[in-house]
Structures are given as C-alpha cells and as structure tokens.
Image: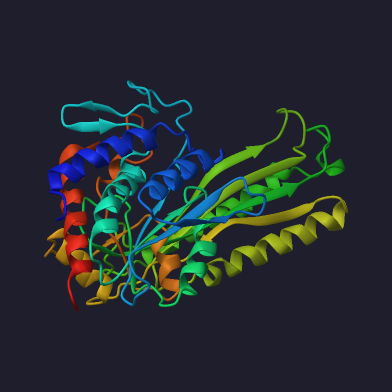
Amino acid sequence: MTASPDVLHDRAVDILTTLVGFDTTSRRSNLALIEWVEAYLADLGIESRRVSNADGSKANLMARIGPAAAGGVILSGHTDVVPVDGQPWSTDPWVLTEKDGKLYGRGSADMKGFIALALAAAPELAKADLQRPAWLALSYDEEIGCLGAPAMIEQLSLEEPRPALAVVGEPTGMEVVGAHKGILSAKVTVTGHEAHSSQTHLGASANMAALPLMADLTAMADRLIADADPASPFEPKHATLTIGLIQGGTAVNILARQCSFSFDLRSPPDQDPAVLLEPFWARCAAMDAELKARFPECGVEWELYSNVPPLALQPGGPAEALARRLAGDNGPLRAVSYAAEAGQFQRGGFPVVLCGPGWIDQAHQPDEWIEVAQMRRGAGFMVRLVEALSAPE
C-alpha cells in the first residue's frame, strides 16, 4: 500500500533538509549531492548511473525505478543553485529553516523541493507493482545555461523501451505549464588601442566602439516590444533583450583598451534568435573590420554562453494529460517567460511539461522559500503518480 501524502510529505522535508545542506552553487561541483542520492537509491535496491561532464567534476544522475516497459515517466530536476553572494539572508541559506508555514533555504523552491518529493516517492515506487517505470533524471549546470541536461537526455532517448514523457519540476505552484521561452546569452568583447584621451587620433577607444553596438541591441529590444503578438500566452508577450553586464576602461583620461558586455535574448517558440541577431552580428563584423583597419590588434569578438531552446505548446499531449490528472489542475495551459530544460527534452523528442512545487517569484532571492502547503500538494502528486504507474493501461 502506498504511503499517505502526509507521510510522503514529512519524508520529503527531511530529504530537502539534506539537499539544501549541499552547496551546489553552479560554480561548485555537485558530486557530494549526487553521491548522497546514489547511496539513498542503492539502499532501496535502485540502480543509478552518472552522465558526467568532460572532467568528471560534475554529473547528471539517471535511475529507472520499475520494469523495463513502455510508458515510463521521467521526473527531472536540476541540482545546481544560484549564488547567495551579497544577498541579505536572515537565515543560513544552507540550513533548511521552517517559519510561518514556509521552508527557507537556497534551492528550496528552485528546485530541490521537487527533487526531494521525487526521492521521497522512490521507496513507494520501489515496492509497488509498477506496470510502467518512473525515471529520475537529475542534471547539473541548469542555472548557467542548461549545460548538463542534453547529454542525459540523449542517453534517455536511447533507452529501450524509451520513456514516454517527462515532467520537469520547475516551480509552477504545482500548476501545469506547457510553454517557456528560450534563452540565448552572449558576451561581446571589443579591443581598442590605448592612448591619452587628448590624442584620439593616436588610439581607438573600445568603449566608444562598443556603444553603437549596444545601441543596436537597445533598438532591437524596442522593436521586439513593438512587434509583440497580442495573442501571445507569455508575460511579457514579446521577446526580451537586456544587457546585463558592462565592463570597460581603466581611467577617465585613457582611451579604453577593452570593453565587454553580455546580453541575453529570451524568445518565444515562434521567433528564432539566430534570425533576430543576424543584423547585430553583421554590425559586429563590420566594427571588427573598421578597428582592424586602423590597428591590426584591435577588433570585436563574441562568444555564446548558452542557447537553450524554447518549449512550444503541445495542447492535449500525453505529458499535459498526465500532469493535469496528478496535479488536479483543470485550469488553462500556461506559459512562462523563464527558460528551463523542458525545451531540451522536447527537442529530444519527449512530450514534456513543467510542474513543480513553489513559485518562480521566490527563486534566486535572498531568503528563498517554499510553502509547506506546496510540498504537501507535491506529495499528493507523487502518491497519485505511484498509483497511475501501477494501474493497467
């Protein structure tokens, strides 16, 4: 008999306490957390395997619970969290703290809460007479560009039988979300030629050369707003482009040798970021040629940090149908403006939705929290998942 939602909830909070205690900020390794999960699953008789990064310092983790049968459901979550540096926390971010019906700690909402619920369900899944398997899929480096998941998704796509669908447990208030924007982030570096600021004919200011490039991006951002589709399900409805970082120059009276700026473009599924940015990259190439004509060592270089695909709506698909049934969600199919790994699952051929406890408004903030009520709702979701996978089709 499957444990009650209350029992599963209490187990999940205990697990969340452990998970929050691992500092898995993206700049650090996640292996200590992965090793703990491996041991936890092994104690339940569940085999798992890693899909590591190139140097083995980080790893995804995959585990199948139940038979090698068609119809498997992937429960996916990322193990990394954003930094707490400089944030005014009133609690220890690495110690789960309950207060006024909320659980405080870095990653409590985004998204160790969902991982804790999935792991809390693992004992129930392991002892149930499952007709279809549950898959646990834990990734690394989601917060810095969804870098880890693609290799794991590739492995999942090669499984026989292949899993049928995926639920990515980003914080959605346990409501089903069927679309998210993609994100392309990039860094542009302009190299100039230093000279005294009174001798502009003897040098080339990287700052001055970078300004028209940034102006182009600003103009593009304005056009995207003007071109917004009134029927778009996203908020805001348009693609968004922002310059988040600018660094340049050494002194007010020196022509800057270097200026760099980083930006991100978040596009809905019907807008291709490569097409949107074609004129900008052409402008960068023209500026590169202009600078090199004066000083061969000067120029413009750029690199992509990330290019995460969007998740396109698939109304009435199997992932939506299952998630709605398990979550008790009869509302509209929603869209969110943040990027996630669901678009990568969709690109890998899996029907997928977002559905997890907590709200994105609490993510990345000081005193990040998740409501106890959300964890309880998530526990009910997991209990119903065990029952659904145990039922004959």
Residue 239 seen anywhere in this rendered image of the structure: no
Quarter occupied by residue 315: bottom left
Quarter occupied by residue 8: top left
For the point 34% across and 48% down, the residue is 115
141 vs 55, nearest the viewer = 55
Percent across and percent down for residue 229 are: 31, 70
For the point 38% across and 23% down, the residue is 88
The N terminus appears in which quarter of the rendering? bottom left
Percent across and percent down for residue 273 are: 51, 67
Indicate the colouring scheme: rainbow
For the point 67% across and 50% down, the residue is 55
Number of numbered discs present? 0
Percent across and percent down for residue 294 are: 86, 53
Relative to 270, is 84 above or below?
Answer: above
Quarter occupied by residue 390: bottom left
Q: In screen coordinates, is 387 left or right of 54?
A: left
The C terminus appears in which quarter of the rendering? bottom left
115 vs 337, nearest the viewer = 115
For the point 44% across and 77% down, the residue is 160
Residue 164 seen anywhere in this rendered image of the structure: yes
163 vs 79, nearest the viewer = 163
Percent across and percent down for residue 268 are: 39, 66
